[in-house]
Image: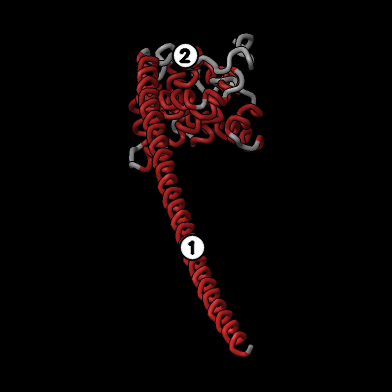
Amino acid sequence: MPFESMDEFEFERELRQSLERQPAPLSLKRKVMDRRQQRRGQLQFRRSATQHRTRMIWLERIAASLVVAGVAGSAVVGHYAVEHRKGEEAKQQVFTALRITNHAFRVMNAQLQRQNKDSQ
Amino acid sequence: MANDWQPGFEPLPDFERLFNEHQSMVFSLALRMTGDRGLAEEIAQDVFLALDENLSKIESPEHARFWLRRVVISRSTDALRRRRARGFGQCVEIDENHGAQAEERSSPLGSRVVALLATLPEAHRAAIILRYQEDLTPEEIAATLGAPLATVKSHLQRGLKMLRTKAESQLKEYIRAV
């Protein structure tokens, strides 16, 4: 039927009939499934690579933390040893000073006793 | 399908089942939009792979259908833009390929109408295809295309008018040639 003589309804009916769904090519399913499988393989590979990378990053972080802790621990222990040694030295100096003072008192005491004897 | 696709029973919809159910719709929409079987097949492949990626977001069979229509129209429009940017002559391509390959089942008039449809602006074409191939209401078309209802109605009216005008003038030449 020529289009000029068609009314709106007939034209739309013709259009609807012309626009019926077309069957998809038979190869479409195979291509989609192949690409899906391929993409899944790539995703799996990427995921395991990411997991490996994440694991390595964590191992590196743990190693770095251990190194930092070791260095910090050594520094603390070193600092404590230095302080301890300084304390020991100070103690020895105090003892030496006390010994010298004691000796001086003894000398002074002996002199005083000698003077007392002489005056009697 | 709706019965055995309930949250809690089947966490993910079955991809192959969705593919079997919607392959014709997706391919036909891409074909009508682009007018090129090869390009339509590529778009259909990409759309189904995108569906596979987004399968966890699909909530129901209706949602899957809506999502597929929306994505295939959008991808077809993108593909046409890319092809235009590369300098392909869209109308020539459509007349040579699509007109010749338009469905063998329909009448010669129908084939010419389909070929002419491919010469409409994309927005008009999308609205007409969704209306007459998918039998959607203007409200559903507006939701699918993400366009205001008034715009969709206007595209439908203008598209039909343009199509009819083109069909009348083309048919005269066709009859003269026959």
Indicate the chain on which mark 2 is placed.
B
| Quarter placement of the N terminus of chain B | top right
Residue A88, numbered circle: 1
Looking at numbered disc 2 in the image, what kind of residue is underneath it?
Glu
On the question of residue B141 being in view, the answer is yes
Please state the horizontal and vertical placement of residue B123, each as a whole percent of the image.
53, 35
Q: Is residue A115 left or right of residue A76?
A: right
Please state the horizontal and vertical placement of residue A50, each as a whole percent of the image.
40, 34
Residue receiving disc 2 = B16
Q: Write the residue at 46% across / 61% down.
A: A85
Is B70 located above or below residue B9 in the figure? Answer: below
The picture quadrant where one finds residue B133 is top right
On the question of residue A4 being in view, the answer is no
Q: Nearer the viewer, residue A60 or A118?
A: A118
Q: Write the residue at 62% across / 90% down.
A: A119
Is B21 located above or below residue A5 in the figure? Answer: above
Say yes or no: labels 2 and 1 on the same chain.
Answer: no
Please state the horizontal and vertical placement of residue B153, each as a whole percent of the image.
63, 33
